[in-house]
Image (cartoon, rainbow, N blue to C red):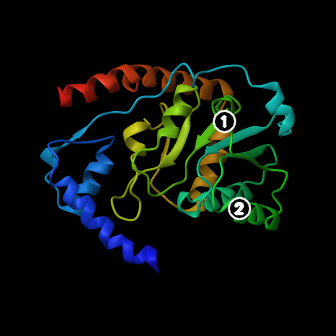
Amino acid sequence: MYKFLLIPIKFLIEKKVLNNVSQIIVFSENVKKELKKIYKKNVKDIKIVNPGVDAQKFKPRSPDKKIIKKFNIKKNDFIVLCVSRMTLSKNIISLIRVIKKINNKKVRLLLVGSGKDLAKFKKNVNRLGLKERVIFTGYRKDVEKFYNLADLFVLPSKKEGFGQVFLEAMSSGVPCLGYKSNNSDVMVATEEIIQDNQTGFLLSDYSIDSMANKVQWIYNQKRTQLKEMGKIARKKCLQEYNWSDFCNKILSFIQ
């Protein structure tokens, strides 16, 4: 009950703050549109600055043998990775159902992260008979090592201000898959980050069948093709999402 009482108060506080600052900086056009829609804010007052990603931490490297052994990852597995909070709002349930739709035991889902709905997801996996195909790691301090196990990174969230994990995957040389925004029930910045069929793949059909078909199609592509996409994604991060540029742009607004 208290949560619902606080929502309008939070809205009023945020609106007050936004109307009394000299400059608003956001990470994406998606957030800029949302501020305009919710708070009726003049978009001229909002500047977009691309965030940065630590390219030395998130980089292509050999898979960690200890992690491979711990989570029983086999040589011929096609690993679909999702790094996320394990909450219903991230649409993880849909991604689990995608794996169920794909009738291929080599396609396995690696879920890295923790959250309030983790137990629900595990029960769902057991109920669907996917215990051998869905791997839960829980919270990890060494999350950067898991990108190097992946053939494809997927974030199925339909509400996302930006999606920093896409940058982490791309910087690690992993092609990504995510949804396009429709500016109503799906509000994401994915298409601002991913170049379709160059650094990853975009979906405008939000059904489980559509994503399952796309993942299966990606699985059928040559691994060398996916690795080449990963190289392009890494290069894009180095050019457009480095910390130095991000810091310099932020400082330019306050000097």
Residue 65 can be seen in this image: yes
**Label 2 residue SS:** helix
Q: Residue 211 appears at what percent x and percent y? A: 58, 54
Residue that label 1 marks: 141
| Residue for point 82% across, 37% down | 73
Which of disc 2 and disc 1 is earlier in sequence? 2
Does residue 125 appear left or right of residue 46 in this picture?
Answer: right
**Label 1 residue SS:** loop
- Density class for disc 2 (Cα within 10 Å; few <14, some 14-19, many ≥20) is some
Q: CA distance from mark 1 to mark 2?
A: 21 Å
Is residue 76 depicted above or below 65 in this figure? below
Does residue 20 appear left or right of residue 10 in this picture?
Answer: left
- Density class for disc 1 (Cα within 10 Å; few <14, some 14-19, many ≥20) is few
Q: Quadrant of residue 219?
A: top right
| Residue for point 13% across, 53% down | 42
Residue that label 2 marks: 121
Is residue 23 depicted above or below 75 in this figure? below
Give the residue type that dot 1 points to: Lys
Q: Residue 110 appears at what percent x and percent y? A: 71, 44
Residue 37 can be seen in this image: no
Question: What is the quadrant of the C terminus in the image?
Answer: top left
Query: How many numbered dots are placed on residues in this image?
Result: 2
| Residue for point 61% across, 29% down | 226
Q: Nearer the viewer, residue 35 or 96?
A: 35
Q: Quadrant of residue 183?
A: bottom left
Give the residue type that dot 2 points to: Phe
Q: Residue 150 appears at what percent x and percent y? A: 68, 34
